[in-house]
Amino acid sequence: MEFFVQFVKDYFIPGSSTFLIIGAVIGVILLYSGKRPNRWGRTWLTILVVFYWVVSTPLGAIALESGLTGKFEPIESLSDAGDAEAVIILGGGSVNLRSRGEVFSLLISASALRAMEGIRLYDLLDEPLMIVSGGSNPFLGGGTPESLMLEDMLMDAGIPEDAIVLESASQSTREQAMKLGPILDEYDVDGFVLVTSAIHMKRSIAVFEAHGMNPIPSPSALRSEGFDGSIAIFPSWIALDASQAAMREYMALGYYWVRGWLSPP
Protein backbone atom coordinates (compact mmCIF):
# COMPACT_ATOMS: atom_id res chain seq x y z
CA MET A 1 0.00 0.00 0.00
CA GLU A 2 2.79 2.44 0.88
CA PHE A 3 4.45 1.82 -2.50
CA PHE A 4 1.15 2.47 -4.31
CA VAL A 5 0.57 5.71 -2.38
CA GLN A 6 4.09 6.91 -3.18
CA PHE A 7 3.62 5.92 -6.84
CA VAL A 8 0.48 8.07 -7.04
CA LYS A 9 2.31 10.97 -5.35
CA ASP A 10 5.15 10.72 -7.86
CA TYR A 11 3.14 10.37 -11.08
CA PHE A 12 -0.55 11.18 -10.74
CA ILE A 13 -0.91 14.46 -8.87
CA PRO A 14 -2.91 16.81 -11.17
CA GLY A 15 -0.85 19.90 -11.86
CA SER A 16 2.47 18.06 -11.78
CA SER A 17 4.81 17.78 -14.76
CA THR A 18 4.58 13.98 -14.73
CA PHE A 19 0.78 14.11 -14.86
CA LEU A 20 1.02 16.54 -17.80
CA ILE A 21 3.45 14.31 -19.72
CA ILE A 22 1.40 11.16 -19.11
CA GLY A 23 -1.78 12.99 -20.14
CA ALA A 24 -0.14 14.35 -23.30
CA VAL A 25 1.12 10.88 -24.28
CA ILE A 26 -2.38 9.44 -23.84
CA GLY A 27 -3.82 12.21 -26.01
CA VAL A 28 -1.26 11.68 -28.79
CA ILE A 29 -1.88 7.92 -28.78
CA LEU A 30 -5.60 8.56 -29.17
CA LEU A 31 -4.96 11.02 -32.02
CA TYR A 32 -3.25 8.33 -34.08
CA SER A 33 -5.53 5.41 -33.17
CA GLY A 34 -8.41 5.69 -35.66
CA LYS A 35 -11.31 8.02 -36.39
CA ARG A 36 -13.27 7.78 -33.12
CA PRO A 37 -10.20 7.67 -30.86
CA ASN A 38 -8.89 10.61 -32.90
CA ARG A 39 -11.86 12.72 -31.77
CA TRP A 40 -11.35 11.55 -28.19
CA GLY A 41 -7.69 12.51 -28.46
CA ARG A 42 -8.50 16.05 -29.60
CA THR A 43 -11.06 16.42 -26.81
CA TRP A 44 -8.67 15.01 -24.21
CA LEU A 45 -5.78 17.27 -25.26
CA THR A 46 -8.05 20.32 -25.28
CA ILE A 47 -9.25 19.54 -21.75
CA LEU A 48 -5.65 18.97 -20.63
CA VAL A 49 -4.46 22.32 -22.05
CA VAL A 50 -7.39 24.26 -20.57
CA PHE A 51 -6.97 22.54 -17.20
CA TYR A 52 -3.25 23.35 -17.01
CA TRP A 53 -3.83 26.93 -18.12
CA VAL A 54 -6.39 27.45 -15.34
CA VAL A 55 -4.41 25.80 -12.53
CA SER A 56 -1.20 27.61 -13.52
CA THR A 57 -2.79 31.04 -13.09
CA PRO A 58 -2.79 32.87 -9.73
CA LEU A 59 -6.61 32.95 -9.81
CA GLY A 60 -6.78 29.19 -10.31
CA ALA A 61 -4.31 28.55 -7.49
CA ILE A 62 -6.17 30.84 -5.09
CA ALA A 63 -9.47 29.14 -5.93
CA LEU A 64 -8.01 25.72 -5.16
CA GLU A 65 -6.36 26.90 -1.94
CA SER A 66 -9.53 28.58 -0.68
CA GLY A 67 -11.26 25.22 -0.40
CA LEU A 68 -8.59 24.07 2.07
CA THR A 69 -7.63 27.12 4.11
CA GLY A 70 -11.12 27.64 5.57
CA LYS A 71 -11.45 29.96 8.54
CA PHE A 72 -8.04 29.28 10.04
CA GLU A 73 -6.04 32.42 10.85
CA PRO A 74 -2.63 32.91 12.51
CA ILE A 75 -2.72 33.72 16.23
CA GLU A 76 -2.15 37.42 16.80
CA SER A 77 -2.34 37.79 20.58
CA LEU A 78 -1.67 35.89 23.79
CA SER A 79 -5.40 35.60 24.46
CA ASP A 80 -5.93 33.86 21.09
CA ALA A 81 -3.75 30.99 22.30
CA GLY A 82 -5.96 30.26 25.31
CA ASP A 83 -4.16 27.98 27.77
CA ALA A 84 -1.58 26.74 25.28
CA GLU A 85 1.68 25.68 26.92
CA ALA A 86 3.46 24.49 23.79
CA VAL A 87 3.80 25.06 20.07
CA ILE A 88 3.95 22.07 17.73
CA ILE A 89 5.53 22.59 14.32
CA LEU A 90 4.85 19.92 11.71
CA GLY A 91 7.55 19.34 9.09
CA GLY A 92 6.39 19.96 5.55
CA GLY A 93 8.99 18.14 3.50
CA SER A 94 12.65 18.18 2.58
CA VAL A 95 14.90 17.33 -0.34
CA ASN A 96 18.13 15.34 -0.35
CA LEU A 97 21.08 16.22 -2.58
CA ARG A 98 23.39 13.29 -3.24
CA SER A 99 26.88 13.39 -4.71
CA ARG A 100 29.83 10.98 -4.44
CA GLY A 101 28.34 9.13 -1.52
CA GLU A 102 27.45 12.28 0.42
CA VAL A 103 23.89 13.34 1.30
CA PHE A 104 22.90 16.91 2.06
CA SER A 105 19.35 17.65 3.19
CA LEU A 106 17.41 20.90 2.77
CA LEU A 107 14.00 21.98 3.99
CA ILE A 108 11.50 22.89 1.29
CA SER A 109 9.85 26.31 1.51
CA ALA A 110 6.70 24.96 3.23
CA SER A 111 8.78 23.62 6.13
CA ALA A 112 10.84 26.80 6.42
CA LEU A 113 7.71 28.96 6.50
CA ARG A 114 6.29 26.76 9.27
CA ALA A 115 9.47 27.26 11.28
CA MET A 116 9.17 31.02 10.78
CA GLU A 117 5.62 30.96 12.13
CA GLY A 118 6.82 28.94 15.12
CA ILE A 119 9.56 31.49 15.82
CA ARG A 120 6.99 34.30 15.74
CA LEU A 121 4.77 32.40 18.18
CA TYR A 122 7.66 31.72 20.56
CA ASP A 123 8.11 35.44 21.05
CA LEU A 124 4.37 36.15 21.13
CA LEU A 125 3.44 33.44 23.65
CA ASP A 126 6.15 34.12 26.25
CA GLU A 127 8.58 31.29 25.47
CA PRO A 128 6.42 28.15 25.27
CA LEU A 129 7.79 24.62 24.85
CA MET A 130 8.61 24.12 21.15
CA ILE A 131 7.93 20.64 19.73
CA VAL A 132 9.11 20.00 16.17
CA SER A 133 8.00 16.93 14.26
CA GLY A 134 9.24 15.26 11.10
CA GLY A 135 11.39 12.30 10.12
CA SER A 136 13.50 11.63 7.05
CA ASN A 137 11.87 10.43 3.84
CA PRO A 138 12.88 6.81 3.03
CA PHE A 139 11.73 7.28 -0.58
CA LEU A 140 14.29 10.08 -0.97
CA GLY A 141 17.18 8.05 0.40
CA GLY A 142 16.92 8.94 4.07
CA GLY A 143 18.92 12.04 4.90
CA THR A 144 18.61 14.34 7.90
CA PRO A 145 15.25 14.25 9.73
CA GLU A 146 13.19 17.38 9.19
CA SER A 147 12.95 17.90 12.93
CA LEU A 148 16.72 18.48 13.20
CA MET A 149 16.71 21.01 10.37
CA LEU A 150 13.72 22.78 11.93
CA GLU A 151 15.55 22.81 15.26
CA ASP A 152 18.52 24.50 13.58
CA MET A 153 16.23 27.26 12.27
CA LEU A 154 14.71 27.80 15.71
CA MET A 155 18.10 27.93 17.40
CA ASP A 156 19.45 30.33 14.76
CA ALA A 157 16.55 32.61 15.72
CA GLY A 158 17.65 32.56 19.36
CA ILE A 159 15.39 29.86 20.82
CA PRO A 160 17.42 27.86 23.37
CA GLU A 161 18.02 24.17 22.73
CA ASP A 162 16.48 23.15 26.07
CA ALA A 163 13.16 24.72 24.96
CA ILE A 164 12.94 22.42 21.92
CA VAL A 165 11.68 18.84 21.86
CA LEU A 166 12.20 16.66 18.77
CA GLU A 167 10.02 13.98 17.19
CA SER A 168 12.15 12.55 14.39
CA ALA A 169 10.51 9.29 13.33
CA SER A 170 7.17 10.21 11.70
CA GLN A 171 6.60 9.83 7.96
CA SER A 172 3.07 11.24 7.62
CA THR A 173 0.54 13.53 9.28
CA ARG A 174 -1.16 10.55 10.94
CA GLU A 175 2.14 9.28 12.33
CA GLN A 176 2.90 12.75 13.65
CA ALA A 177 -0.33 12.77 15.63
CA MET A 178 0.29 9.24 16.93
CA LYS A 179 3.84 9.99 18.06
CA LEU A 180 3.21 13.47 19.45
CA GLY A 181 0.43 12.35 21.82
CA PRO A 182 2.82 10.49 24.16
CA ILE A 183 5.27 13.42 24.05
CA LEU A 184 2.53 15.81 25.17
CA ASP A 185 1.69 13.40 28.00
CA GLU A 186 5.35 13.13 28.98
CA TYR A 187 5.68 16.91 29.32
CA ASP A 188 2.20 17.23 30.90
CA VAL A 189 0.98 19.54 28.12
CA ASP A 190 -2.77 19.95 27.73
CA GLY A 191 -3.16 22.91 25.39
CA PHE A 192 -0.96 23.59 22.40
CA VAL A 193 -0.80 25.63 19.23
CA LEU A 194 -0.45 23.65 16.01
CA VAL A 195 1.64 25.16 13.22
CA THR A 196 1.46 23.84 9.67
CA SER A 197 0.77 25.23 6.22
CA ALA A 198 -2.63 26.83 5.70
CA ILE A 199 -3.70 24.22 3.12
CA HIS A 200 -2.56 21.38 5.43
CA MET A 201 -4.30 22.68 8.55
CA LYS A 202 -7.76 21.21 7.83
CA ARG A 203 -6.44 17.64 7.62
CA SER A 204 -4.03 18.12 10.51
CA ILE A 205 -6.71 19.41 12.87
CA ALA A 206 -9.01 16.51 11.97
CA VAL A 207 -6.26 13.92 12.50
CA PHE A 208 -5.14 15.37 15.85
CA GLU A 209 -8.73 15.60 17.08
CA ALA A 210 -9.28 11.99 16.00
CA HIS A 211 -6.45 11.08 18.39
CA GLY A 212 -8.06 12.92 21.31
CA MET A 213 -6.17 16.20 21.12
CA ASN A 214 -7.53 19.74 20.78
CA PRO A 215 -5.01 21.87 18.89
CA ILE A 216 -5.28 25.61 18.47
CA PRO A 217 -4.45 26.36 14.82
CA SER A 218 -1.98 28.99 13.67
CA PRO A 219 -1.24 28.39 9.97
CA SER A 220 2.00 29.51 8.37
CA ALA A 221 2.14 31.61 5.21
CA LEU A 222 1.35 29.84 1.96
CA ARG A 223 4.43 31.30 0.25
CA SER A 224 7.19 33.80 0.77
CA GLU A 225 6.27 37.46 0.41
CA GLY A 226 7.27 39.25 -2.76
CA PHE A 227 7.26 36.21 -5.03
CA ASP A 228 3.87 36.53 -6.70
CA GLY A 229 3.73 39.45 -9.08
CA SER A 230 2.09 37.48 -11.89
CA ILE A 231 -0.89 38.61 -13.94
CA ALA A 232 -3.94 36.94 -12.41
CA ILE A 233 -5.11 35.11 -15.55
CA PHE A 234 -1.70 34.27 -17.06
CA PRO A 235 0.28 31.14 -16.21
CA SER A 236 3.21 31.17 -13.80
CA TRP A 237 5.32 28.41 -12.30
CA ILE A 238 4.65 29.75 -8.81
CA ALA A 239 0.90 29.42 -9.30
CA LEU A 240 1.27 25.95 -10.85
CA ASP A 241 3.36 24.76 -7.89
CA ALA A 242 0.72 26.15 -5.51
CA SER A 243 -2.07 24.39 -7.43
CA GLN A 244 -0.13 21.13 -7.41
CA ALA A 245 0.31 21.35 -3.63
CA ALA A 246 -3.43 22.02 -3.20
CA MET A 247 -4.35 19.10 -5.49
CA ARG A 248 -2.06 16.83 -3.50
CA GLU A 249 -3.76 17.93 -0.29
CA TYR A 250 -7.25 17.27 -1.70
CA MET A 251 -6.15 13.76 -2.65
CA ALA A 252 -4.62 13.23 0.79
CA LEU A 253 -7.85 14.36 2.45
CA GLY A 254 -9.78 11.87 0.34
CA TYR A 255 -7.34 9.09 1.15
CA TYR A 256 -7.46 9.82 4.89
CA TRP A 257 -11.27 9.90 4.76
CA VAL A 258 -11.43 6.53 3.00
CA ARG A 259 -9.05 5.02 5.57
CA GLY A 260 -11.14 6.43 8.44
CA TRP A 261 -8.24 8.49 9.83
CA LEU A 262 -10.20 11.74 10.13
CA SER A 263 -12.50 10.46 12.90
CA PRO A 264 -11.83 8.73 16.25
CA PRO A 265 -11.08 5.00 15.96
Image (cartoon, helix red, strand yellow):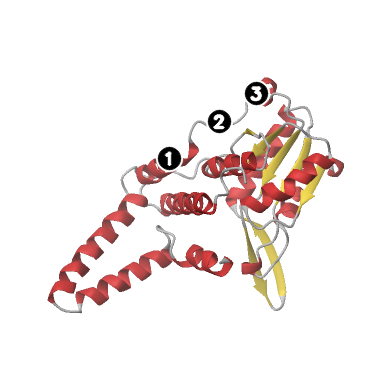
Q: Residue at x 62, y 50 (%)?
A: 173
Coordinates of residue 32 in the picture (x, y in percent): 20, 79
Q: Residues within 10 Å of mark 2 (few under 14, many from 20)?
A: few
The residue beneath circle 3 is 80
Horizontally, is 174 left or right of 187 in the view? left
For badge 3, the amino acid type reads: Asp
Residue at image coords 37%, 69%: 21
| Residue for point 78% across, 45% down | 182
**Dot 3, how many residues are within 10 Å of its Cα: few (below 14), some (14-19), or many (20+)?**
some
Q: Name the quadrant containing residue 203.
A: top right
Locate residue 152, reporting x and y percent. Answer: 76, 50
Rendered residue at 60%/44% (across/down): 207
Q: How many marks?
A: 3
Task: Tell me the distance, in whole angstroms, between the alpha carbons under discs 1 and 3.
Answer: 24 Å
Q: Residues within 10 Å of mark 1 (few under 14, many from 20)?
A: few
Residue hosting label 2: 73
Q: Amino acid at mark 1?
A: Gly
Observer-nearest residue: 145 or 96? Answer: 145
Relative to 1, say whether 191 is above or below: above
In primary-sequence order, the first of circles 2 and 3 is 2
Secondary element at tag 3: helix
Give the residue type that dot 2 points to: Glu
Residue 27, visible in the rendered structure: yes
Q: Is residue 174 above or below residue 138?
A: above
**Regarding mark 1 in the picture, which secondary structure is present there?**
helix
Residue 29: image tag = none
Sequence-wise, the earlier of marks 1 and 3 is 1
Q: Which residue is mark 1?
A: 67
